[in-house]
Image (spheres, rainbow, N blue to C red):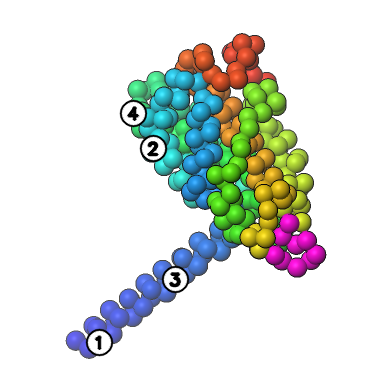
């Protein structure tokens, strides 16, 4: 009997060690990945929904919970991926949604996948995600918290459907977006290390580079999510009439594709 208890105890101890190892592995694998906080994420999604064609806006508003679920699941599971993998995942989601519509899938499922599309765009537009600079890794958590504290004050702007126009393949479009990333990162790092020594974001005011970069990055992310959603909605034969800021000349054409 004593031997059985010992063997069981040994197995339990091995399981505990294995669980601890798995948790540590997850933490290590996610190091350097930047994910947005809840308030920031919701503001981004709600802003993108506001820009959507009224018919799509109605769907995503009615099933907001499912849209946000798709966003959060994707941010949690994909934030550590490389850009090439994110682009492939985005193209897969863009191709999947028309198929779901043709099969008359539930509105909940469709909203969920629109959320996944938005999250993949947010990740591709994030200049801090997986940045290998040790200073970026050091300030990543604090900057995320800073954005959460300040997001209510952010005024997000839409750059328009043609500035620049969304294009296929998506990898080319987001590669161009990355050209501005070093400038954004250095501007934020300057706030954190003004004289070489790290300071807290609590010392920043609302005129700081950190505040400005946050507004710009979130605005571009929202703009791109709106552009990709519009592209997908068109491919689903969705009605685009009444889409905010969409000019007549842009309704049937996008760079790299003519419908």
Label drawn at residue 149 = none
The span shown in magenta is: 191-199
195 in magenta: yes
Reading the chain from its start, which is encountered first: label 2 or label 4?
2
Label drawn at residue 106 = 4
In terms of secondary structure, where does tag 3 sit?
helix
Q: CA distance from mark 1 to mark 4?
A: 55 Å
Q: Residue at x 41, y 68 (%)?
A: 19
Q: CA distance from mark 3 to mark 2?
A: 32 Å
Q: Is residue 224 above or below residue 77?
A: above
Q: Nearer the viewer, residue 123 or 94?
A: 123
**Can you identify the residue that label 1 sits on?**
3
Q: Is residue 171 above or below residue 166?
A: below
Q: Residue at x 69, y 45 (%)?
A: 212
**Can you identify the residue that label 3 sits on?**
20
In terms of secondary structure, where does tag 1 sit?
helix
Labelled pair 4, 3 in contact (Cβ < 8 Å): no
Q: Nearer the viewer, mark 1 or mark 3?
A: 3
Name the chief secondary structure element in magenta: loop
User: In this orientation, does residue 258 appear?
Assistant: no
């Amino acid at each position: 009997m004593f031997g059985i208890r010992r063997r069981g105890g040994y197995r339990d101890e091995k399981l505990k060690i294995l669980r601890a190892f798995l948790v540590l592995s997850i933490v290590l694998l996610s190091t350097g990945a930047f994910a947005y906080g809840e308030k920031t994420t919701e503001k981004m999604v709600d802003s993108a929904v506001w820009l959507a064609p009224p018919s799509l806006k109605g769907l995503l508003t009615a099933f907001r919970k499912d849209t946000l679920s798709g966003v959060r699941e994707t941010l949690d599971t994909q934030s550590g991926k490389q850009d090439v993998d994110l682009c492939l995942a985005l193209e897969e989601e863009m191709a999947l949604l028309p198929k779901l519509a043709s099969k008359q899938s539930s509105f909940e499922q469709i909203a969920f996948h629109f959320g996944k599309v938005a999250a993949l765009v947010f990740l591709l537009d994030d200049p801090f995600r997986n940045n290998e600079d040790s200073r970026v890794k050091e300030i990543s958590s604090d900057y995320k918290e800073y954005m959460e504290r300040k997001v209510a004050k952010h005024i997000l702007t839409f750059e328009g459907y043609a500035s620049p126009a969304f294009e296929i393949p998506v990898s080319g479009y987001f590669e161009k977006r990355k050209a501005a990333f070093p400038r954004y990162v250095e501007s934020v790092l300057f706030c954190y290390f003004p004289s070489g020594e790290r300071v807290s974001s609590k010392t920043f005011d609302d005129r700081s580079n950190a505040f400005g970069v946050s507004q710009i990055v979130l605005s571009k992310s929202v703009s791109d999510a709106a552009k990709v959603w519009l592209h997908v909605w068109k491919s689903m034969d969705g009605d685009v009439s009444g889409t905010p800021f969409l000019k007549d000349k842009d309704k049937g054409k996008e760079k790299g594709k003519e419908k």
